[in-house]
């Protein structure tokens, strides 16, 4: 059985070891968990560019030592030139997945760092920005080894990706992907991070850097303008919450699918599955996912355009009704709609005072839109491809509108004083993976390492797979797989014990009294935990 690393006072977890080291360094310098996460967010943007970057978005959940939970929405809206008429006039039936027309939303991540660091200072943080960005700048300037994850990754629409402006010069080695372990330098991105360190994070939107970003976007043909950058501001949002057994769970409100994550766990709790790693457990999670996604796809949209209060789906009465509709003997035939794909990083941090952070940062598809801005070295997200060009859609394209997000950071506060930060990357898989690792820990007594290591399943689409099958890793009991098939589930065995498409998850748990922290990140990733 895998062992969970335990730290005496503070810890971080990340999908790349250099990001975890950056966070540990900040903690050792008496930085708090938010400051550690800012350093990790900057570093992971350099060393894990297939999964995220500063040209993308982010979402924060922060639990203060006194128990207050705060959310930071750092996702950018569609640019002012991103109209349905623009795309229709170009002959598009859907929004392109790659290229300048895919780079149609403002990148919000840097704005989120700024708002989070404002909160860090209010909570006693004192480290200067150049200290927090130092590791990221060094890795971009001096170079770092390409990760095994990036090297083994086969992006969707790879030819289109490689043809995008600036991509080959930045992310290819002689026209081919870099080999694992090869050193890659990102000098333009290093200059950009240095500018942010000296001029401040707001420079990304309203300063010299913002002017360069806007000029590059304009030259490449993106519908995002300088005025769009100047107008952008992150928002503080109240988290969604769910009382479940002996804990209160928190997740992010729309435009993310955090609602689905809480619904899954709320429904599954009501199914009263007593035996872990059983057919009943897997069936219950799959069926709860179907019901949660049906609600998500009808309701989740831009926060300012919601037609129904998402908390209304988390009442005991509503969850009782949803659970009662599940047949524990047969698979329901519920079509799954929605985006499905998404490449992302989840990271967590808890400091000596008990300040806990759950953070997720993404550019949507691997390498986002694929375009790399020549003056700044930023590769820009393609999150706007989750908009629809169709009239009457739940998430229609509209200038100033926020797109649907798969990104969801999770937190939990247990009645006995334990605090958990947890999450995963993985598109539609994120709420499912959260439910699997949380229930294994909280309901069935697994350690954090066991809960994250255990085999996972995924209902629905991810990474371009069009089938609505239940995808499973190799380590499931064959008898359970046979029973699930007999219940009507279409099971797709992926042929591996640890599969990237089934998430890079992590979990930190701080215990009351002595303040020790268990922290782990996924063996499917290139990271781990670190701490003091």
Image (tube, grey):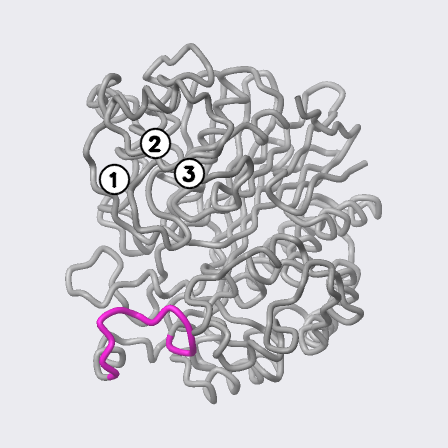
415 is within the stretch colored magenta: no
Query: Which mark lies nearer to you, 1 or 3?
Result: 3
Residue 270 drawn above or below residue 462 = above
Instruction: Determine whether, in the image, residue 450 is placed left or right of residue 289.
Output: right
Q: Position of residue 475 (x, y in %)?
A: 51, 28
Return the residue nearer the eye: 449 or 519.
449
Going from N to C along the chain, the mark reached first, 3 or 2, is 2
**Label 3, label 2: how far apart the Cα atoms are:** 9 Å
The reply to whether callout 1 and callout 2 are in contact (CB within 8 Å) is yes
Main secondary-structure element of the magenta-colored stretch: loop
Q: Secondary structure at mark 3?
A: helix
95 is within the stretch colored magenta: yes
Q: Which residues are magenta?
A: 90-101
Instruction: Determine whether, in the image, residue 263 is placed left or right of residue 172.
Output: left
Q: Residue furthest right?
A: 29
Q: Residue furthest top?
A: 274
Mark 3: few/some/many CA within 10 Å (<14, 14-19, 20+): many
Q: Where does label 3 land, which residue?
A: 431
Going from N to C along the chain, the mark reached first, 1 or 2, is 2
| Residue at the image point whose x is 61% and y is 41% from the top | 357
Q: Where does label 2 land, which residue?
A: 263
- For residue 295, the mark is 1
Q: Position of residue 221 (x, y in %)?
A: 41, 85
């Amino acid at each position: 059985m895998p062992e969970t690393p335990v730290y005496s006072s503070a810890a971080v977890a990340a999908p790349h070891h250099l990001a975890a080291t950056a966070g540990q360094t900040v903690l050792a310098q008496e930085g708090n968990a938010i400051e550690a996460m800012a350093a990790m967010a900057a570093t992971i943007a350099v060393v894990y560019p297939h999964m995220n970057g500063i040209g993308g978005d982010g979402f924060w959940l922060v639990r203060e030592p006194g128990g207050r939970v705060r959310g930071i929405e750092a996702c950018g809206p569609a640019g002012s030139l991103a109209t349905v008429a623009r795309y229709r006039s170009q002959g598009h039936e859907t929004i392109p997945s790659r290229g300048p027309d895919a780079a149609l939303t403002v990148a919000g991540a840097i704005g989120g760092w700024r708002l989070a660091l404002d909160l860090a200072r209010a909570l006693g943080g004192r480290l200067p920005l150049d200290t927090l960005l130092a590791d990221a700048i060094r890795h971009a300037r001096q170079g770092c080894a390409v990760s095994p994850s990036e090297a083994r990754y086969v992006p969707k629409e790879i030819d289109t990706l490689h043809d995008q402006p600036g991509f080959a010069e930045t992310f290819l080695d002689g026209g081919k992907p870099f080999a694992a372990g090869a050193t890659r330098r990102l000098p333009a991105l290093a200059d950009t991070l240095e500018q942010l360190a000296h001029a401040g994070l707001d420079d990304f939107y309203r300063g010299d850097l913002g002017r360069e970003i806007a000029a590059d976007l304009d030259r490449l043909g993106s519908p995002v303008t300088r005025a769009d950058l100047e107008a952008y501001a992150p928002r503080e949002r109240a988290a969604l919450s769910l009382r479940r057994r002996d804990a209160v769970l928190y997740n992010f409100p729309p435009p993310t699918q955090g609602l689905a994550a809480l619904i899954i766990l709320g429904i599954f709790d009501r199914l009263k599955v007593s035996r872990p790693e059983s057919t009943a457990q897997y069936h219950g999670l799959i069926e709860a996912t179907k019901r949660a996604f049906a609600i998500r796809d009808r309701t989740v949209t831009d926060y300012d355009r919601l037609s129904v209060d998402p908390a209304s789906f988390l009442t005991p009465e509503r969850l009782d009704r949803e659970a009662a509709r599940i047949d524990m003997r047969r698979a329901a035939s519920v079509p799954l709609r929605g985006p499905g794909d998404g490449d992302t990083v989840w990271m967590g941090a808890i400091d000596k005072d008990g300040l806990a952070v759950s953070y997720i940062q993404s550019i949507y598809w691997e390498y986002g839109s694929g375009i790399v801005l020549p003056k700044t070295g930023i590769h820009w997200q393609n999150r706007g491809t989750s908009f629809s060009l169709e009239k009457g859609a739940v998430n229609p394209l509209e200038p100033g509108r926020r797109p649907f997000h798969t990104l969801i950071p999770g937190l939990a506060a247990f009645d006995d004083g334990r605090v958990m930060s947890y999450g995963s990357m993985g598109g539609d898989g994120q709420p499912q993976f959260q439910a699997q690792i949380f229930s294994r820990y909280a309901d069935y007594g697994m350690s954090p390492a066991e809960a994250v290591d255990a085999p996972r399943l995924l209902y629905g689409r991810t990474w371009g797979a069009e089938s609505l099958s239940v995808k499973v890793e190799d380590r499931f009991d064959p008898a359970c797989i046979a029973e699930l098939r007999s219940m009507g589930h279409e099971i797709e065995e992926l042929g591996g014990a640890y599969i990237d498409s089934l998430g890079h998850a992590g979990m930190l748990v701080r215990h009351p009294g002595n303040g020790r922290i268990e922290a782990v990140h996924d063996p499917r990733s290139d990271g781990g935990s670190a701490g003091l």
